[in-house]
Amino acid sequence: MTTITEIAPDIYRISAFVPEYNMQFNHFLIKDEEPMLYHTGMRMMFPLLKEAVARLMNPDQLRWVGFSHFEVDECGSLNDWLELAPHAQAVCSETGALVNMGDFAIRPARGLRRADVLETGRYRYRLIPTPHLPHGWDAGVLFEEETKTLFCSDLFHQDGNGVALTEHDILGEVRASLRAGQSSPLPDYMPYTYKTKMMLAELASLQPSTLAIMHGSSFKGHCSQALLDLDGIMKEELGEEGRGAKR
C-alpha cells in the first residue's frame, strides 16, 4: 500500500512503509512537460509503485528517471521503468553514468556535471555532487530551482512511519535513527569525512524551501539551518570520536 501527498507544487511523494524494516521508502513524481520520477524503488516494489504513479499520470509518459546513487531502493527497478516508458532516460551524476549505468541501464543515462541544468518545462534541476554523502562514490543530490526543493536521498533518514510533510524539527528523529543504525547488524550506513561539513554547507547555501527525504517525513521550514545542524549530528554520531565512544 502506498500513500500519495503533494509536498510542493507538482511534486508528489509516493510512500510505502515496510514494517519489517520499520522504514518508509519514498519516491517523488514531478509532473511537468517532461515528467520525472525520482527514486525508482526496488524491483519487488515496481508493481506497487507503478500503480501509484498511474493514479497521477500515464506511467509510459515518464521522460526522466532520477536517483542519487547506485543502490536498490534508488534505482533497482530502473530498467522496468525504461521498458515501460519508451522515451524515458535515466539521469544521475556524471560519475554514476560512467561507472554504473553504462553496464546496468538498458539505455544510456544522462550524467549531470555540476554546471549542468536539466529543464523539464516549468522546472529546472541542478545536480550537486556529494561523493560519499550519504554514501557511494557516485552520490549527488538534485535541486529544483523553481520550487526550491532539495531531493536529499538518505540524508535526514528517520525510522518509523512518519507524516508525509512536517514543519516540526526532525533532527531528534534523525539522530535516533543514526544511533540505532550504528548498533544494528549493518552499521556504517553513512560515513563522516573531512568533506562532509563543506558539502552540507554548500547544500545549505541553496536555501531550499522543502527537503524531499527518502526515508521518513519530508521537511518544510528552516531547511538551510537543518542542513548545517545535520553536520553536527553526523559528526557526533558517525565521526571517529562518536564511534569510539560507542564501542
Image (cartoon, grey):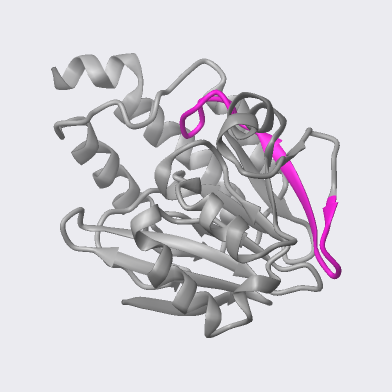
Is 243 positioned to the left or the right of 112 in the image?
left
Residue 123, magenta (yes or no) = yes
Quarter of the rendering containing residue 41: bottom left
Q: Residue at x 52, y 57 (%)?
A: 80
Does residue 210 appear in this view? Answer: no
- Residue 141 appears left or right of 153: right
> Is residue 172 located in the magenta-colored stretch of the structure?
no
* Rendering coords of residue 164 (x, y %): 42, 72
Give residue 88's position: percent from left, percent from top: 70, 58
Question: Relative to 105, does residue 41 appear above or below in the rendering?
Answer: below
Residue extent of the magenta highlight: 118-138
Looking at the picture, does residue 119 appear above or below residue 225? below
Compare residues 92 and 205 and report the one nearer the observer.
92
> Do we see residue 205 in this rendering?
yes
Which residue sits at x=59%, y=30%?
103
Residue nearest the viewer, comparing 31 with 194: 31
Depth order, front residue of 49/24: 49
**Which residue is rendered at x = 62% and y = 34% of the image?**
101
What quarter of the picture does the N terminus occupy?
bottom left
Residue at the location (38% across, 36% down)? Answer: 233
Horizontal relation, residue 230 to residue 205: left or right: left
Q: Quick one: 27 or 200, which is closer to the camera?
A: 27
Question: Residue 245 location, x and y as percent?
Answer: 18, 18
Q: How many numbered discs sit on the rendered protein?
A: 0
Vertical placement of residue 178 versus 99, above or below: below
Residue at the bottom extreme, as displayed: 55
Q: Is residue 207 left or right of residue 133?
A: right
Q: Looking at the rendering, in which quadrant would you find the C terminus?
A: top left
- Most prominent secondary structure in the magenta stretch? loop
In percent of width and height, residue 228 lies at 54, 39
Q: Is residue 25 above or below residue 179?
A: below
